[in-house]
Image (cartoon, helix red, strand yellow):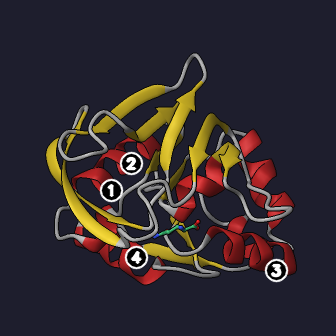
Amino acid sequence: MAEKTIGVLALQGDFREHAASLKAIGQEPVFVRRPHELDKVDALIVPGGESTAMWKLATTAEMFEPVRKRIADGMPVFGTCAGMIMLADRIVDAAAGQQTFGGLPITVRRNAFGRQTESFEEPISFDGVGELTGVFIRAPWVESVEEGVEVLARVTSGPATGRIVAVRQGNLLATSFHPELTADHRVHAFFVDVVRAA
Ligand code: GLN
């Protein structure tokens, strides 16, 4: 079977870092800004950044409905931080009117770790991947999951111990933290496996 094409939603946020992570594991990334570019990819990464800005830009670029439709049709998607928020069906502490692509029956809390803790690292134990360092930047956590959602990682130390920070349901994968900001590409490799199996 031909190699699958993984797009990186490049409207806002750290899409270049995701592209670099994919390249590092031998996967050629494609930036996606417009619907005709979305049509050409088999899977999508929704980067970290700012979910309200991403929502507005996706609407302006007429990408909102096309991405929703592809998710409903089963396209594999990996969202990090703001990208996790974009994949969540429900948000606590959303901006007024804020909408998400949705698809994951989870509730995420924006800026959950407190506004003063802008950025920090915590050890994470990731099911199927192993121990890794989670980089968190004004991150959400997953407040609750519906049945059928696999919890893949929780914070293992510090005041947020036990909080859910990685989930998967079928072809949708989301992390509160930013594997794309580290030299450890195992979570991207995990997603590539999900895409190949899809
Ligand atoms: N707090 C941001 C939001 O609500 C997410 C931060 C991030 O992606 N690093 O979108």
Q: Earlier in the sequence, mark 4 or mark 1?
A: 4
Q: Is ligand 1 within 8 Å of the beta carbon of the residue shown at mark 1?
A: no
Q: CA distance from mark 2 to mark 1?
A: 5 Å
| Residue bearing the label numbered 4 | 19
- Under mark 3, the amino acid is Ala
Say if residue 44 shows up in the picture.
Answer: no
Left or right: where 117 falls relative to 161: right
Q: CA distance from mark 4 to mark 3?
A: 21 Å
Residue shown at 65% from the left, 57% from the top: 86
Would the CB of label 2 be found within 8 Å of ligand 1? no
**Circle 2 residues within 10 Å: few <14, some 14–19, many ≥20:** many
Q: Secondary structure at mark 1?
A: helix
In this picture, residue 127 sits left or right of residue 139:
left
CA gap between label 2 and label 4 equals: 13 Å
State how far apart marks 2 and 3 are (Cα): 26 Å
Secondary structure, mark 4, is: helix
Is residue 19 toward the left or the right of residue 88 in the image? Answer: left
| Secondary element at tag 3 | loop
Q: Are marks 3 and 1 in contact (CB under 8 Å)?
A: no
Residue 123 % position (x, y): 16, 49
Which residue does the numbered mark 3 point to in the structure image?
A: 61
How many neighbours does mark 4 have within 10 angstroms: few (below 14), some (14-19), or many (20 or more)?
many
Say whether marks 4 and 3 touch (CB < 8 Å): no
Q: Position of residue 39 (x, y in %)?
A: 73, 64
On residue 191, the disc is 2
Nearer to us in this view, 176 or 58: 176
Disc ID at residue 188: 1
Measured Cα–Cα span from mark 4 to mark 1: 10 Å
Q: Is residue 32 left or right of residue 95?
A: left
